[in-house]
Image: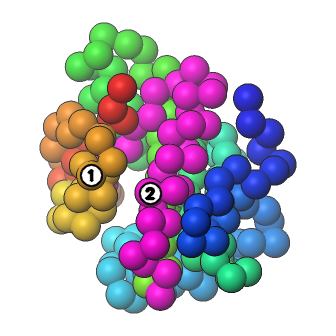
Amino acid sequence: MLSPCVPVLEDPYGVLVRPRTDRDLDACVRVLAEVHGRDGYPVDWPDDPAAWLAPPSDLATWVAETDGRLAGHVRLSRGGPGDAAPGVWSALSGTDAAAAAVISRLFVAPSARGQGIGALLVQRAVAAARERGLWPVLDVVASDTAAAALYERLGWRLLATVDQEWGPGRTVAVRCYAAGA
């Protein structure tokens, strides 16, 4: 089992994926704001972005660095009320939804794209889920075709597209995925 205290992945381009620390949150919020401005992720900007990135339900979180600068982020957690994928996966697999781990809060700085950072972050989260005996799942807003394309390139299986409640009278279509075998 990998320790969450040590660097976990480094690729030939010098991208380091390591556990996120509280000291990283300000940089994470800055990068998230860049991503939101460019791509509209997250769809609804949170009132407290640092709390949105670091809720108490985290199993683990990682950041990617290039040249000592924060370049990306990913979170692994148990499913919660806002996660559609664990329930869809459970219904299709016949396995209790508690056996799933949700990969979320994945983003890469616009200036750092094209280096495989998103794939490295997803790979680390998948490995951590499997180390815990959990099945990795995720959901993504159906209109986010770039994210869906990344997951499909990485071998994720589309389970279903479902409508998710995002507040009174507001539903959003999300694509639910499970990691490949």
Q: Residue furthest front?
A: 12
Look at the picture and state if 98 lies above or below 152. above
Image quadrant holding the C terminus, namely top left
Boundaries of the magenta span: 111-140
| Kind of residue at badge 1 | Arg
Image quadrant holding the N terminus, namely top right
Residue 38 coordinates in the image, percent (x, y): 35, 87
Look at the picture and state if 50 lies above or below 156. below
> Can see residue 28?
no
Residue at point 33%, 21% (across, down):
90
| Kind of residue at badge 2 | Ala
Q: Which residue is mark 1?
A: 153
In magenta segment, residue 118: yes
In magenta segment, residue 136: yes
Residue 43 coordinates in the image, percent (x, y): 34, 71
Q: Nearer the viewer, residue 157 or 41?
A: 157
Q: How is the image coloured?
A: rainbow
